[in-house]
Amino acid sequence: MSVNTKNIIIFSLVLLSIVFWGVILYFFKPQEIIKNIGVTNSYIFIFLMATFSGVSSFTSTSHYATVFTFAAGGLNPFLISIFAGIGMTIGDSVFYYLGKRGAQSLPESVERKFQSIKCWIEKKSKKLLPAIVYMYTGFTPLPGDFLSIFLGITSVKYKTIIVPIILGNMTLMLWISFFAQAMN
């Protein structure tokens, strides 16, 4: 499959996801969706959606729309942030692992560049990297996949970044949930 065909498929899936949620929300109010799914099932759905949409940067749009919809429907923003944050962190962890394993197959020139970045990171304060990771994941809607891959490639210790990633993901989901409820 060519790169162009792959890009068209990804774009089509994202567009289809947006249209799907738009149609659902046109015909059903968020409260009706939650009533039909059930409150407990809604949190499980949010967790699963976050976990599986977190495995691709291109499906995060549908995840954000899901969180927004369920928060607007009246679900507890704190519970949403916990379930969605943990799910997103699982997806980010997969990409960290892929980056760590994929680093072994990088050309030597690219690997040297990543090693120089790693040395620069290690020279900085040990508190700086976790703070940057938290700010990135907690206050930007940018995909955590790229950050996780980068951190995996540079061999930053997983235990150094896992707490900032999960707290950042929870913070972002809390912001989205509060925004959805304020808009409702």
Image (tube, rainbow, N blue to C red):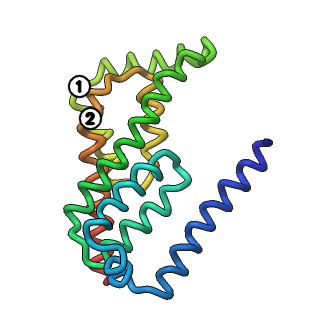
User: Which quarter of the rendered picture does the C terminus lie within?
Assistant: bottom left
Residue 32: x and y, percent? 36, 84
Left or right: 131, with 147 as reference point: left
Residue 177: x, y in percent?
A: 29, 68
Above-or-below relation of 144 to 61: above
Q: Amino acid at mark 2?
A: Pro
Residue 63 circle label: none
Residue 87 lies, in percent from the top left, at 34, 49
Give the residue pinned by disc 2: 130
Number of residue marks: 2
Disc 1 residue type? Lys
Tell me if 109 is positioned left or right of 75 in this view.
right
Residue 140: quadrant of the picture: bottom left
Q: Are marks 2 and 1 in contact (CB under 8 Å)?
A: yes
Which image quarter: residue 14? bottom right
Secondary element at image label 1: loop
Position of 102 compared to 68: left or right?
right
In the picture, the quarter occupied by the N terminus is top right
Q: Residue at x 44, y 35 (%)?
A: 94
Residue at x 44%, y 86% (from the top left corner):
28
Q: Which residue is mark 1?
A: 126
Residue at position x 30%, y 18% from top? 123
Would residue 158 appear left or right of 51 to someone viewing this image?
left
The one nearer the camera, 50 or 178, is 50
Identify whether 73 is placed above or below 161: below
Q: Tell me the element at label 2.
A: helix
Residue 47: image location, x then y, percent: 34, 55
Q: Residue at x 78, y 48 (%)?
A: 4
Residue neighbourhood size for the residue with mark 2, other residues' Cα within 10 Å, grouped as few (<14), some (14–19), many (≥20): some
- Please name whichever residue, 34 or 159, is drawn nearer the observer in this view of the structure: 34
* Picture layout, residue 9 above or below residue 177: above
Cα separation, mark 2 vs mark 1, equals: 8 Å
